Image: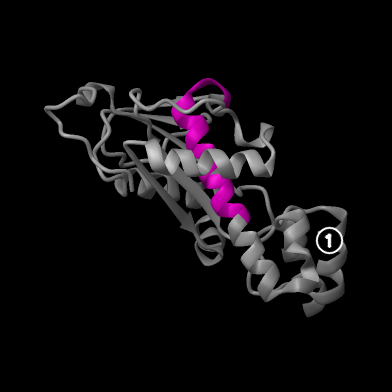
Amino acid sequence: MAAQPDLFGSAQASSDWIAGVDEAGRGPLAGPVFAAAVILDPLHPIEGLADSKKLSARRREVLAAQIRERALAWAVTQADVDTIDHLNILQATLQAMRQACEALSRPPQLILVDGNRLPRGLPCPARAVVGGDALEPAISAASILAKTARDACCLDLHAQYPHYAFDQHKGYGTALHLERLAQFGPCPAHRRSFAPVRRLLQDVQT
């Protein structure tokens, strides 16, 4: 986590501690969903923050390193496949978002969440911002941390299950992924509650 500045020194007042929150991995058929929360430091701005989907993988990695170094606080959490299948993907995502906020090394005064839904039980007032990953720098930063963490996880999954090509499709339901899924069946990383995986399991059972 970033070093904490003296509350009575040159750092901005706590009223400026706004946390941006975003997720990565709601749509894929496999792997955890990740959430991140970031409180940026206006005294150490980061140039080029944007919706992570609009950035190249190389640029995301560069920005992620800068965010971890310069932000006042940041946290990345995840909801695993079992949690997703038990709760459903929306509730698992909201849970991971709340946990990311709770894991921040300092309490924010306001939380801005990308999208139109707010997790329950957040530690301070919060506002949902549709398209926030392109509008609010703190949400953009959170989207970058969540996306880079999710991509790193998919590379780990590829190392464990190379025949699924997780390094290429990152778990999304591409033609390649569906082809490998039909060929090899689901692996432990696949979300059983998602329709393509569920249908395949039902076909096997019948």
Q: Report whether residue 145 is seen.
A: yes
State yes or no: residue 12 in magenta.
no
57 to the left or right of 105: right
Q: Amino acid at mark 1?
A: Leu
Residue 18, image x, y percentages:
33, 27
Q: Tell which residue pokes out farthest to the left in this image.
A: 8
Q: Is residue 117 above or below residue 195?
A: above
Residue under pointer 1: 178
Q: Is residue 144 above or below residue 189?
A: above
State yes or no: residue 141 in magenta.
yes
Q: Report whether residue 206 is seen.
A: no
Residue 145, image x, y percentages:
51, 44
The residue lying at 36 percent from left, 41 percent from top is 120
Quarter assignment of residue 8: top left
- Viewer-proximal residue among 24 and 45: 45
Quarter assignment of residue 196: bottom right
The residue lying at 26 percent from left, 38 percent from top is 123
- Screen quadrant of the C terminus: bottom right
Q: Which residues are magenta?
A: 134-151
